[in-house]
Amino acid sequence: MYGVSVQAVRGRGYRLGQAISWLDPHSLQRLLAGQGHDFSLIHRETVDSTNTQLMVEALSGARHRTVLYADYQTAGRGRRGRSWEVSLGGGLTFSVLWRFEQSISQLSGLSLVAGIAIARALSQISPVPVRLKWPNDVLAGYRKLAGILVEAQGELAGSSFAVIGIGINERLPAQHRQEIDQAIIDFNDLGVKPDRTQLVFSILRELSMLMDVFERQGLTVALSEWPAWHAHEGRQVMIRTPDGGTHEGKVAGLDASGGLLLQLPDGTHRQFSVGEVSLRPRQES
Ligand code: BTN
């Protein structure tokens, strides 16, 4: 249960194999309020998925900027139908509700904004460069340190909302590593012991600033910052589309909607939309 190791201590009982750093919700609220970032925090010990639960809260009227943080998820979800498994204390899992006056069609590129917010926050504590793999995997040393799952709902011509789910690897058990078909990394590999309260605060602060700009000006600012984070800019890559097709080419930046542009071998450019492709570099460095 919970995927944690427990050690027997002679004459004293049992203890966890690794000390767990818990989030302190009261300190987090204080830090956010102190800098004028208005979030409502829901703290749960165990949920199936913070995205699923925050979606339920959103549909029952939860306010804009509600954050649902869980110490443990029993059925965490990743992109493209994958699961996101974290042992107790092995990673951070939380979701943020953002309500928009704009329609859902205006939200493309939102996951890029979230990616930049997390990259900014993680780069403050990572000893190796943090980069983004399009659309929104957060890498440290070209291995995945954090993932984002954005789920949006709304009307085509009315208001909308998005649940932005964030998962960050702190200490992945060996068994989980074997099950994941991607190059991954955790804070333990990086020799970093993050203060969870500070880290969540730092992510929410960056998110708050970037989302305010996104609401007012759309993607322009995020797109200007994106190349500085982009792991594969100018590199030869292969894209696999959900229909099973594969496309090779050189990454040529993003278009105005946040789609990835590839220069194909015949010199033409082709755009791939958010959520429709997976990116696999031919060689990782
Ligand atoms: C990915 O596949 O890269 C996205 C992973 C997103 C995982 C987070 S953990 C918190 C939130 N709740 C979920 O069920 N998923 C997201």
Image (cartoon, grey):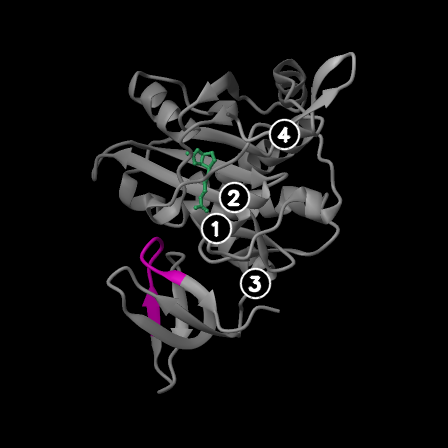
Q: What's under tag 1, amino acid-wise? A: Ile
Question: Is the CB of mark 2 within 8 Å of ligand 1?
Answer: no
- Label 1 or label 3, whichever lies nearer to me, is 1
Classify the position of the C terminus by image quarter.
bottom right
Circle 1 is placed at which residue position? 180
Q: Mark 4 or 1, which is nearer the eye?
A: 4
Magenta residues, start to end: 270-278
* Secondary structure at numbered mark 2: helix
What's the residue type where badge 3 is placed?
Ala
C-alpha span from label 4 to label 2: 14 Å
Mark 1 or mark 4, which is nearer the start of the sequence? 4
Q: Residue furthest front?
A: 10
Give the image quarter of residue 192.
top right
- Left or right: where 247 falls relative to 201: left
Residue 275 part of the magenta segment: yes
Is 179 above or below relative to 216?
below
Whether label 4 touches label 3, CB < 8 Å:
no
Q: Which mark is residue 176?
A: 2
Write the residue at 76% across / 19% down.
9
Which residue bears the numbered disc 3? Answer: 231
The Cα atoms of the two marked residues, 3 and 2, are separated by 25 Å
The amino acid on which the numbered mark 2 sits, given as a three-letter code, is His
Crowding at dot 4, Cα within 10 Å, few <14 / some 14-19 / many 20+, comes out as few
Q: Residue at x 42, y 34 (%)?
A: 76
Which type of secondary structure does the marked residue at label 1 adopt?
A: loop
Gap between marks 4 and 3 measured at Cα: 35 Å
Q: Residue at x 38, y 23 (%)?
A: 53
Horizontally, residue 276 falls left or right of residue 64, namely left
| Residue on which disc 4 sits | 5
Q: Tell me where residue 203 sits by quadrant.
A: top right
